[in-house]
Image (spheres, rainbow, N blue to C red):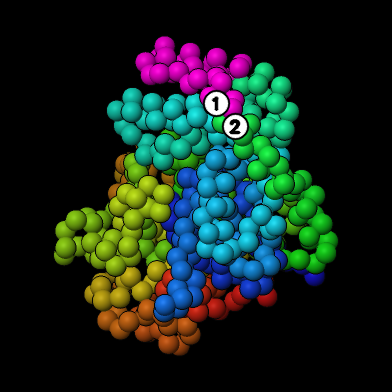
Amino acid sequence: MAKNVVVIGTQWGDEGKGKIVDWLTDHAQGVVRFQGGHNAGHTLVIGQGAKQREYKLNLVPSGIVREGIECFIGNGVVLDAGHLLYEIAGLEKEGIEVRSRLKVSPGCPLIMDYHVKLDNAREAARDKKIGTTGKGIGPTYEDKVARRALRVYDLFYPERFAEKLAEVLDYHNFVLTKYFNVEAVDFQQQLDSALSRAEHIRPLVTDISAALYDAHKAGKNLLFEGAQGTLLDVDHGTYPYVTSSNCVAGQASAGSGVGPDMLHYVLGITKAYTTRVGGGPFPSELDIDCIDSPGFQMSDKGREIGTVTKRKRRCGWFDAGALRRSARINGLTGLCITKLDVLDGIAELDICTGYELDGKVTDMLPVGAEDVARCKPIYETLQGWSESTFGVNTWDGLPQNARAYLKRLEELCGVPVDIVSTGPERDETIVLRHPFA
């Protein structure tokens, strides 16, 4: 019987979802992206030694680097057609067959040049920067909700596309020129650019909902791959310092066109510490510039640089209050703890178990940035370990204090630790319970 697994980031993104999705493809026949856009960044390390290759993916699902895996981009994804073709070309240059295995929903809203211009103009005008990637994601989702978006299927009807483009561009150019005082986007250039990609995209376009139902009926296991993280969810994250889509497990259904009954296991990916890129509150944040700070080790040893933004990630102690909220929102079945090895050698490890807010103690991360910013973290201290955990692939091979740390995270969050990742390669993984078992 087919089993489907949803892989979700439980923090502020960058938890290492790409490696785990790649690892899980041994038991899956399809991988599905269901939200976000090319603001996502999944890094995969494939092979060893001289044959090792690193792939950085933004739009194409992580399963594409494995032969025989079908990949689906669902309707919940906003699509930059030019970037998609660029990413496909890069993969093909590496000898990876993409076009026969990649399918794109006709319902994906298209990211256009005016969306990118608006995104950057708004961020430049803000006193308090949100930290947007500037790739047009937010304005595209706005157009979708306002029912004026151009979608993939519009590309194949040039006259209709031109008519819709003229109307929406007139609106956005008014905002760009009159409010932000920046140059307008040229209609003909935008039309020609978009339509020139239509025939390259057409062979990929498929009814994703129907394809996933057919795959499930045929007994194929599916992986639903989330981008960003729960605390960046537009509804449940530290609003307004969030992304513009829903990053939670429930979106796997809405963003791909399958019923919730087809989602059987939700795996929450969680770093052994916490990171965040861009603006917004971060209760357990540490100094990453002081060489004596544990935050410096997290940043340096963890190579905490954003895949898309190239910005240094902010680093801090593990936040159990934040994970409790993520566990509740996503209905987590199990946890995968990544980057445990980054903590090797830190004498004492703090865990944020809750917060003091307005004189009261709470064990759950509040909703909204303003309240989170006023939270004072409450810490519990555990003894660290001096031994290396890098590459360890058995539970008994871990130092006793590392096992105690993981068990404490499990107790505090109320979700079992099913997987531990101790390095970027596939075999650097400890499996306590397999999601597809």
Residue 153, image quadrant: top right
Badge number at residue 194 = 2
At horizontal 37% and vertical 58% (from top left) the residue drawn is: 274
User: Which quarter shows the C terminus?
Assistant: bottom right
SS assignment for the magenta stretch, majority:
helix
At horizontal 59% and vertical 63% (from top left) the residue drawn is: 96
Q: Do the residues labelled 2 and 1 touch (CB within 8 Å)?
A: yes
Which amino acid type is marked by label 1? Gln
Q: In the visual, does 90 lie left or right of 380? A: right
Which amino acid type is marked by label 2? Ala
Secondary structure category for the residue under label 1: helix
Instruction: Decide whether residue 114 is among the magenta residues.
Output: no
Mark 1 Cα-neighbour bin, 10 Å: few <14, some 14–19, many ≥20:
some
Badge number at residue 89 = none
Q: What stretch is highlighted in magenta?
A: 166-192
Tally of numbered tags: 2
Badge number at residue 190 = 1
The location of residue 151, given as percent across then percent down, is 66, 33
Q: In the visual, does 202 lie left or right of 281? A: right
Mark 2 Cα-neighbour bin, 10 Å: few <14, some 14–19, many ≥20:
many
